Image (cartoon, helix red, strand yellow):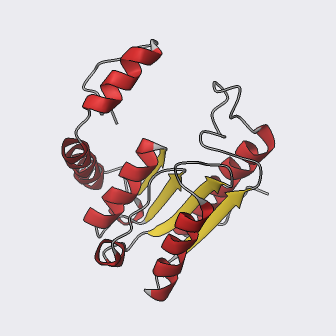
Amino acid sequence: MDLYQGKVTADPTEARKLKRDLREGRAIRDLQGAFVYLGHRPDVDPKHIGSLGWSMGGGLAIQLAIREPGLAACVVNYGPLPTIPEDIEKINAQVLGIFGTLDRSISPAKVRTFESCMNTLNKAVDIAIYDGAGHAFENPADKNAYRPKAATDAWLRTLRFFDKARGAKSSIA
């Protein structure tokens, strides 16, 4: 998804400005449009569409799950989680959440509260919280945050999750 409407930059200051100027409502509408588009493609099974995102993108992925009852699976990598039970109740997608114990913006306590709410509502949820990992621990460009072992495990977990969500036997060990 091109949430920035063709604007790209390698400058961190400009990237922060683009992110700051992104309106969540428009971003979610764009994601909903992508969901509809994919659902009409002849090479896509509309019952097996998923969302995946990191940080802000993870938050948007779960917001799509709230708004699209037909979404099959959602992976949130250290993204903000919904806190309103009525929003969580709308989630039909299976959810995988990947977080770090050292993330200052999304604490393990917040993650466990979300997981508990999902479980109480009989929603499919799988949470992984990696010890010694903080925000952006899967990003190799962030030398301070990157945790290669945790990042590799998180990616393999994501692949297995999507295989399971679409009913395929995973070839990932």
| Residue 126 point in image, percent of width and height | 60, 70
Q: Is residue 11 above or below residue 51?
A: above
Q: Position of residue 97 (x, y in %)?
A: 56, 60
Q: How many numbered discs, if any?
A: 0
Q: Is residue 76 visible?
A: yes
Q: Nearer the viewer, residue 8 or 51?
A: 8
- In this rendering, would 82 be left or right of 157? left
Return the residue nearer the eye: 98 or 155: 98
Residue depicted at x 24% and y 52%: 32
The residue shown at (46%, 60%) is 74
Residue at the location (79% across, 57% down)? 173
* Front position in the image: 156 or 146: 146
Residue 95 located left or right of residue 168: left
Measured along the vertical axis of the image, is residue 14 above or below residue 56?
A: above
Q: Position of residue 48 (x, y in %)?
A: 42, 62
Residue 172 horizontal side relative to residue 127, left or right? right
Instruction: Say whether residue 168 is visible.
Output: no
What is the quadrant of the N terminus in the image?
Answer: top left
